[in-house]
Image (spheres, helix red, strand yellow):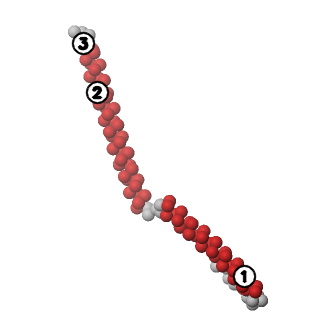
Amino acid sequence: MTNRGPNRMLDEFARMMTDAAGAAQGVRREMETVFRTQGERFINQMDLVQREEFEVVREMAAKARMENEALKKRIADLEAKLGGGVKPADVPDAM
């Protein structure tokens, strides 16, 4: 029976360690959930723009810039055809 005593103690210790490891994993998962929730709440309060929205606005700005350049060139061409009544230096630059 003396062999049974130490084996039983080792079995109990192993079970305790397994339970402790499982509890530690549960605490870790719970902490990750809490941190993730708090992080999402913090970001939402900062009123940040999502990447997709930013890309759409950036494309719109690039298109508007190209259209503006095309219109500047068209105005310059029309003024040249009219005999240059207004010099480009007389027109204030919008940008």
Mark sitting earlier along the chain (3/1): 3
Q: Marks 2/1: CA distance? A: 85 Å
Residue 76, label in figure: 1
Check whether the beta carbons of the residues at disc 3 and disc 1 lie within 8 A of each other: no
Answer with left or right where residue 87 lies relative to residue 11: right
Q: Position of residue 84 (x, y in %)?
A: 76, 88
Q: Position of residue 78 (x, y in %)?
A: 72, 85
Of circles 3 and 1, the one toward us is 1
The quarter of the rendered structure image containing the N terminus is: top left
- Residue at figure coordinates x 75%, y 89% from the top left: 82
* SS state under label 2: helix
Answer with left or right where residue 49 lies relative to residue 6: right
Of circles 2 and 1, the one toward us is 1
Compared to 47, does 33 lie above or below?
above
Q: Read off the residue under disc 2.
A: 16
Kind of residue sitting beneath label 1: Ala
Mark sitting earlier along the chain (2/3): 3
Q: Read off the residue under disc 3.
A: 4
Check whether the beta carbons of the residues at disc 2 and disc 1 lie within 8 A of each other: no
Q: Circle 2: is it few (<14), some (14-19), or many (20+) Cα within 10 Å?
A: few
- Residue at figure coordinates x 67%, y 75% from the top left: 69
* SS state under label 1: helix
- Residue at figure coordinates x 76%, y 85% from the top left: 80
Q: Marks 2/3: CA distance? A: 18 Å
Q: Position of residue 35 (x, y in %)?
A: 38, 49
* SS state under label 3: helix
Q: Position of residue 94 (x, y in %)?
A: 64, 79
- Residue at figure coordinates x 76%, y 86% from the top left: 81
